[in-house]
Image (tube, rainbow, N blue to C red):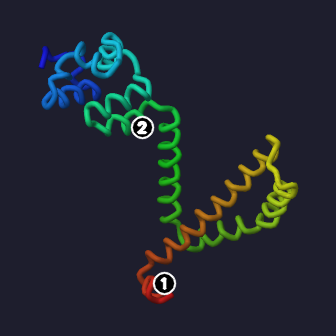
Amino acid sequence: MGRKASKATDNIYYMARCNAALSDDAYTSREKTAVRLGIERSRLARIELDKIEPYAEEVLIMARAYNAPYLCEDFCNHICPIGIQKALKEHQREDTQDKQETESLERLVLRFLSSTQSIDEISNQLVNITKDGLIDSYEEISDLREVLDAMESLSDIINSIKSWINKNPALKPYFTEDNK
């Protein structure tokens, strides 16, 4: 392999190229790699030196060529705005579930009862949205989003109650799959 790029030693794309170079001489230099990948040499250098972020297509090309699928996962988790938003929502959901699982049964039941009081309103809203068979306005889409959020919240509370019951040593034997 050519000289080590001392400024890129901790760059994930550079390290993946170096690993690929161990089994394929086409990746021993940026020039050879650029030709093989179809990515301009100076652009590849800027990516490996953390001067610019690669495009999703470039990451996919590198991941396949270097046999490094983790490049795609890293891109999605750290660069792609959609992936970052999805990871953030998942993290928030896990935090919410952890919080709900530590709540007392009494608190969970109160939250459940509070949520179920709005079921009639949610049902009416859902009927109004879908009565013409179309969801065709921004207002209907917005209302449907609220309905789905309310339903998901209720589902989370129900799952938390189930989890609480299943984790309770005194109740667990009565709620296993064998006893249903």
| Left or right placement of residue 29 versus residue 80 in this view | left
In the orientation shown, which residue stands out farthest toward the top?
42
Q: Which residue is mark 2?
A: 77
Give SS at disc 2: helix
Give the percent coordinates (x, y) of residue 123: 80, 64
Write down the residue under mark 1.
Answer: 175
Q: Quadrant of residue 176?
A: bottom left
Q: Residue at x 71, y 49 (%)?
A: 145
Classify 104 as above or below 4.
below
> Counting other residues with Cα less than 10 Å from the Cα at mark 2, is it few (<14), some (14-19), or many (20 or more)?
some
Looking at the rendered structure, the kind of residue marked 1 is Phe
87 relative to 66 in the view: left or right:
right
In the image, taking residue 56 as reference, residue 32 lies left or right, namely left
Amino acid type of the residue tagged 2 in the rendering? Asn
Q: Residues within 10 Å of mark 1 (few under 14, many from 20)?
A: few
* Image vertical order of residue 87 relative to residue 55, above or below: below
On residue 90, which mark appears?
Answer: none
Q: Tell me which residue sits at (53%, 46%) in the image.
A: 89
Q: What quarter of the picture does the N terminus occupy?
A: top left
